[in-house]
Image (spheres, rainbow, N blue to C red):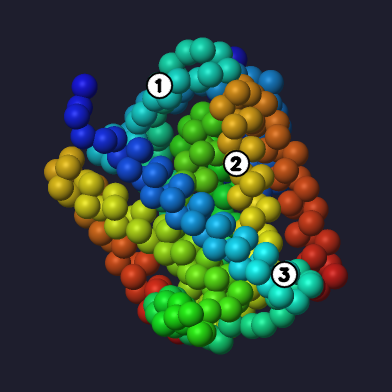
Amino acid sequence: MRPRPDMEVVVGSILLAGVLSSMALLAAGLAWHWVRSGNMTLDYSLAGTTVFQFVLADIAQLAPDTLRPRVLVNLGIAVLLLTPYVRVLASMLYFALVERNLKYSVFAALVLLVLTYSLFLR
Amino acid sequence: MPWPAWEEASSSFPRSPLASWLALWLQRNEAWQPIASHDRFSRWLELAGGYDDRACGERIEYRAGRAALGGPLMFGAGVIAGLLGIGAGALKVLIHDLVMGLPPKVSTTTSNLIIGVSALAGTSVCLAAGLIDPGLAAPVVLGVTAGAYVGTRILVRVTNETVRRIFLAVLIVLAIEMIVRGIRGG
């Protein structure tokens, strides 16, 4: 009926892509750690940072000389954290630009506002 | 007759979780019934939908009511979830089922869809406090996601009544676990 993709398809693809890439990063990180050290336990803790800083710090460590198993695991966690954020952003844009539904655009924008605030919490 | 029983059961929701568990238990053998009246606020929010039920091969149309009560209760569910880390899912499903009158399958899947968003708001606080253990998080994510994949494939094939029975069993296990944790002080 409608040529444009459904909201459900858009959101579903984002969630699927986010979860699958996060799982791939976590599995790769764990496997690499296991090959290198022979055990499965990753024993380190994360410094208390905002989600925003956490993501930037991980991306900065993607260079070949700093890349370690824990960077992959951190990135996996970061992708998982950002997936619902991207999902809300996408639904807001969809409501505003495709459906042109003011009411739901405002709702999604409010949720996005709260989430954005939480990303900068510390 | 399912109707009066449903009304009675749902009005007891705010009193205690035990009462809501009993309410769900009492109607465990009853088929889900659509709500009779759609209040103005819920209509304004366009809380209605439909899905193709693969278990009975029919299209199920549903409406959600009493959004004015459900909304504030969801706020409470969020506070409790953030406080105890049990995930707002179980509480949200209760509110969807008993207050807003959604079919069990729809309440389960809706809660699943929203949980990532509500969890992010809480998780960012935990991350900022340095409370996330990556060595623990990595295997948990891999296991839980694999389980969720299997679970959703089962969900679409079973009936609404089965979903409700499984939910009841899980709810009682959760409650016992929380009581034990509370007594032990861990």
- In this figure, what is the number of numbered marks? 3
Spatial CA span between label 2 and label 3 = 28 Å
Spatial CA span between label 1 and label 3 = 52 Å
Location of mark 2 (residue): B149
The chain letter under disc 2 is B
- Looking at the picture, which amino acid does disc 3 mark? Val
Residue A82 or residue A37, whichever sits in front: A37
- With respect to residue A85, does B168 lie above or below? above
**Which element type, helix, strand or loop, lies under badge 3?**
helix
- Looking at the picture, which amino acid does disc 2 mark? Tyr
Query: Hey, which residue is sitting farthest top in the picture?
Result: B57
Identify the image quadrant of residue A111.
bottom left
Q: Residues within 10 Å of mark 2 (few under 14, many from 20)?
A: few
Location of mark 3 (residue): A35
- With respect to residue B130, does B143 lie above or below? above
- Looking at the picture, which amino acid does disc 1 mark? Glu
Viewer-side label of 1, 3: 3
x then y, percent, for residue B144: 65, 52
Q: Residues within 10 Å of mark 1 (few under 14, many from 20)?
A: few
Identify the image quadrant of residue A43.
bottom right
Q: Residues within 10 Å of mark 3 (few under 14, many from 20)?
A: few
